[in-house]
Every structure is written in structure tokens, then in C-alpha cells.
Amino acid sequence: MRDDPHSGPSPLTRRAFLRTTGGTAAAAVIAGYSTPGQSASPADSADGPHIEGAVPLTLRINGTDRPLRVDPRTTLLDCLRETVALTGTKKGCDHGQCGACTVHVNGRRVNACLSLAVMHEGDEITTIEGLGTPDALHPMQAAFVAYDGYQCGYCTSGQIMSGVALLKEPCGPDDAAVKELMSGNICRCGAYANIVAAIQKVRTST
Ligand code: FES
């Protein structure tokens, strides 16, 4: 089998490929995670692994400065989830079409999958983890619970982040206006009526 010229690529070739692959793989390595067959050296765990082309970056996330080293091609979404390990922000389509990755940047909603982490030095980034706590829910989080604004929960953090941002945006008073401004957030379970009810509850009580 090992002499078969038609067998798969050698382990060395595969490693070389992984070393030159950016995006998620690079972010995972930056986060200190080992890919199968690899282990972090003591030097890696002390100073971070050497990532060719990585740049130093400090992101302010949920009120805390996070000094990082990231591949400049890393999206804000991958940086949040895999480098900083804030996994409340979800990856759905990774193409700006579903809204699952919605976070706030300087108070405005942004699809984190469409933005590079290096673009956000100095910005105030808020994720669902920075909105409320289990003991002190943000009013929008509490309304989603009260109105069953979630089913499987996968899109919920993005829906809530969008709903909170919507409170500061020009929006008409009726449900149709809310649906229009929430149209970038897809719920595959179809809990739209409950999501709109939750948002309207917060809008009329604040
Ligand atoms: S994961 Fe970003 S919009 Fe779908």
C-alpha cells in the first residue's frame, strides 16, 4: 500500500498543506488548539504558535481588551469563536445571508462573517455574551424567553443582537416595519411571529 503511486498524499505533504492554509485552521492554531497529529510545543503555549504572516491586534470585546495575534485573513466571526472562544455568535451560512453571526460594532449590527478581524482595532465589539447574564438577562433576552422567540436556538443570538440594534434604528411602529428590519436574520424553524412579538414587547415597554 505504501508503495502504491496512486495512494493518497503523504502525511508530510498534508502537513505542508495545512501550514499554508489560512482562515479557520489558522485561527484554531492561534487559539492554541492542536490539529490531529500535532501538539503544541512549550514555546507555543508560552508565546503563541508561530503563524506566518500573523499580525498583533487588540480587540475590545464586551468591555475587555484582548491582545491577539491573528492571520490577517481571519474573519471577525472566526476570531470571536475560535481565537477568543466566544461561541455564542453562530456561524450559519458564512456568506452574509442568514444573520446568525450578528454582533454589534460601535453599537451597530454587523455580520461578523463578512468582516475581517483586523479591521476592528479600537472598535467596541459586543457579542451575545456581553449583552446580559443568566441572572440578569437583557430585556430582549427576557422577551425572547417569555414569547418563545426561539425554537432550535441556533439563530437566536443573532436575532437578539439584531433586535437590540433595531431599538436604536428608525423603525415604524407596526409589525411590518419590524419584519422589514429583521429580514436579514433567518430562522429556519419559522419562529418569526414570536420573534416579532418579543421585539415589539421590548419596543413598547422601553
Ligand atoms: S454566518 Fe454570517 S450571515 Fe450567515
Image (cartoon, rainbow, N blue to C red):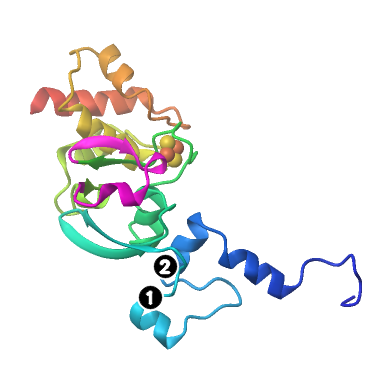
The verdict on label 1 being within 8 Å of ligand 1 is no
Report the side of 53 relative to 123 (left or right).
Answer: right
**Quarter of the rendered structure image containing ligand 1:** top left
Q: Is residue 117 magenta?
A: yes
Q: Quadrant of residue 82?
A: bottom left
Q: Is residue 50 magenta?
A: no
Residue 91 at x, y percent in the picture? 44, 45
Is residue 18 depicted above or below 98 in this figure?
Answer: below
Quadrant, the N terminus? bottom right
Q: Residue at x 42, y 87 (%)?
A: 42
Quadrant, the C terminus? top left
Q: Residue at x 39, y 28 (%)?
A: 191
Is residue 17 depicted above or below 180 in this figure?
Answer: below
Amino acid on which the number 1 mark rests in the picture: Gly
Q: Secondary structure at mark 2?
A: helix
Q: Which residue is mark 2?
A: 30
Residue 111 versus residue 74: which sits nearer the camera?
Answer: 74
Part of the protein shown in magenta:
106-124
Residue 183 at x, y percent in the picture? 37, 22
Q: CA distance from mark 1 to mark 2?
A: 7 Å
| Contact? badges 1 and 2 (CB < 8 Å) | yes
> Tag on residue 48?
1
Residue 202 at x, y percent in the picture? 16, 29
Disc 2 packing (10 Å; few <14; some 14–19; many ≥20): many
Q: Residue at x 34, y 79 (%)?
A: 47
Q: Residue at x 9, y 27 (%)?
A: 205
Report the side of 22 relative to 84 (left or right).
Answer: right
